[in-house]
């Protein structure tokens, strides 16, 4: 199986080289979405090769000009603009409406039209250079701006009779450049309600820096077997004018750079593919921002400076994925574990006039995030997915609330795909623990099950 898809990729790489869930890629390659995806956005082995090859594999007509005397290709790009559109609509029902102190009986049953609407530039820019650039309108915030972005350059080299892809990536979020669906940006369950309550605690690498940093990295993918990547990230917050300061709205600004690394081994045999990998992120953040001092009457807001020394984070993750892709049956299973160590020098130093903590109770904390997911699809028409997630960590009432960062979540989903680029689904999320709470001890607060969510959606990409 590897021989066949590598042969196609090798041909494309010599022509120029190629994936995410956007039909603009299908128009460029002349291939169906199923070549790169089991169900979008989950990638197949061929899809991973396409993405590593900088999204440039092209079988359709190109506008080009022959190479110069030094054999440099002076012009080559598709004969059309590689644009795509994605839209999701959703309906959300929680077991008990999202209550607050001001509105204990908040409105339930929310219809989002749209929940998200995205426009993509997705495909080849020039020989060996391609991009996946997403602009998204979010209905919940009524905001339109840059979303996931990954600009790549890739080159192919023969090494020991094997195919080696080497490349560079410019992107805006740790793990957005990843090829597997076990890391945070592209991990299951892929789609969820934008208005349902979610647990407070998460590790730094699980989206806290998304679209707020710029990263430049290099990577190599050898023979479809071994993938390695190393990136360095700096703050690039959207909607904040430099110089970065707390008064300007900046939070979690990188002190120097944050290194990110990724290493994966993958093996394909017949219709089966197994991968095992590790990834991580480390660095220092200057927290800044605004907190509320509840010891005053009325409560007052405090602007925290971008204080040095900052908070140190060390995240390391381990993941594994198994795929079976047959003519009728597709099965995928994946697991991810992330450990985070925190040294909150700056945050722990935020105190009121009486010395009461405003940032965190502890200087040293840790978090443990675990996810297990499995999905089955029949004939690329109907399918189901189940995802179990847990969060455990240090008790810190100021940082995570009085009950701590514990959460246990089970999500089940059924979906129908009348076409490869259109999915209708019904998802139910059960919380066994939510921000450390299982049941309300006095009957006045929210139990974990109050946050259980039924979510129906339609997801179209064209």
Image (cartoon, rainbow, N blue to C red):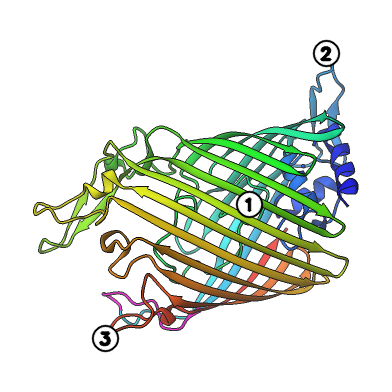
Q: Position of residue 47 (x, y in %)?
A: 76, 50
Q: Is residue 41 visible?
A: no
Q: Position of residue 362 (x, y in %)?
A: 26, 54
Quadrant hosting residue 309: top left
Mark 2 element type: loop
Mark 1 element type: strand
The residue beneath circle 3 is: 442
Q: Determine the residue located farthest toward the top in the rendered image.
A: 69
Q: Position of residue 377 (x, y in %)?
A: 76, 71
The residue beneath circle 1 is: 119
Is 55 within the magenta? no
The magenta stretch is: 93-103
How far separated are the C-alphas under marks 3 and 2? 79 Å
Badge 2: residue crowd in 10 Å (few <14, some 14–19, many ≥20): few
Name the mark on residue 344: none
Of the residues tagged 1 and 2, which is closer to the observer? 2
- In front of the other: 340 or 422: 340
Asked if marks 3 and 2 touch (Cβ < 8 Å), the reply is no
Q: Determine the residue located farthest toward the bottom in the rendered image.
A: 443
The overriding secondary structure of the stretch rendered in magenta is loop
The residue beneath circle 2 is: 70
Quadrant hosting residue 328: bottom right
- In front of the other: 69 or 261: 261
Q: Would you place residue 408 above or below residue 143 in this image?
A: below
Q: Residue at x 34, y 36 (%)?
A: 244
391 to the left or right of 3: left
288 to the left or right of 454: left
């Amino acid at each position: 199986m590897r021989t066949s898809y590598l042969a196609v990729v090798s041909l494309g790489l010599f022509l120029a080289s190629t994936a995410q869930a956007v039909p603009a890629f299908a128009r460029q390659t002349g291939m169906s979405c199923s070549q790169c995806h089991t169900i979008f956005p989950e990638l197949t082995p061929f899809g991973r090769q396409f993405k590593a090859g900088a999204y440039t594999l092209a079988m359709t007509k190109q506008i080009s000009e022959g190479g110069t005397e030094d054999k440099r290709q002076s012009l080559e790009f598709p004969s059309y603009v590689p644009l795509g559109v994605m839209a999701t609509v959703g309906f959300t029902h929680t077991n008990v409406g999202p209550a607050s102190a001001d509105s204990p009986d908040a409105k339930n049953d929310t219809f989002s039209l749209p929940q998200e609407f995205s426009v993509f530039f997705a495909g080849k820019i020039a020989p060996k250079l391609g991009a996946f650039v997403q602009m998204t309108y979010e209905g919940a915030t009524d905001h339109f701006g840059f979303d996931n972005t990954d600009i790549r350059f890739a080159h192919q080299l023969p090494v020991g009779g094997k195919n080696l892809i080497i490349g560079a990536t410019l992107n805006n979020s740790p793990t957005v450049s990843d090829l597997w669906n076990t890391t945070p940006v592209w991990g299951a369950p892929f789609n969820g309600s934008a208005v349902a309550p979610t647990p407070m605690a998460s590790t730094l690498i699980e989206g806290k820096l998304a679209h707020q940093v710029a990263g430049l990295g290099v990577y190599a993918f050898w023979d479809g077997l071994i993938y390695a990547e190393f990136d360095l990230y700096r703050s690039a917050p959207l909607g904040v004018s430099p110089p970065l300061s707390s008064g300007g709205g900046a939070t979690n600004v990188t002190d120097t750079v944050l290194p990110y690394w990724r290493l994966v081994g993958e093996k394909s045999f017949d219709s089966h593919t197994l991968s095992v990998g590790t990834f991580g992120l480390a660095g220092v953040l200057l927290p800044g921002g605004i907190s509320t001092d509840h010891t005053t009457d009325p409560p007052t807001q405090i602007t925290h400076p971008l204080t040095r020394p900052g908070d140190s984070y060390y995240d390391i993750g381990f993941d594994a994925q198994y795929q079976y892709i047959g003519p009728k049956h597709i099965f995928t299973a994946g697991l991810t574990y992330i450990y985070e160590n925190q040294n909150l020098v700056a945050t722990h130093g935020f105190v009121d006039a009486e010395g009461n903590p405003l940032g965190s109770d502890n200087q040293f904390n840790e978090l443990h995030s675990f996810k297990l997911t499995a999905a089955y699809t029949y004939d690329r028409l109907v399918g189901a997915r189940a995802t179990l997630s847990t969060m455990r960590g240090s008790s810190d009432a100021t940082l995570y609330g009085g009950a701590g960062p514990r959460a246990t979540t089970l999500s089940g989903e059924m979906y129908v795909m009348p076409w490869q680029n259109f999915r209708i689904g019904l998802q139910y999320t059960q919380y066994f623990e939510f921000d450390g709470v299982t049941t309300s001890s006095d009957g006045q607060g929210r139990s974990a099950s109050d946050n259980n969510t039924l979510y129906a959606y339609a997801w179209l990409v064209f």
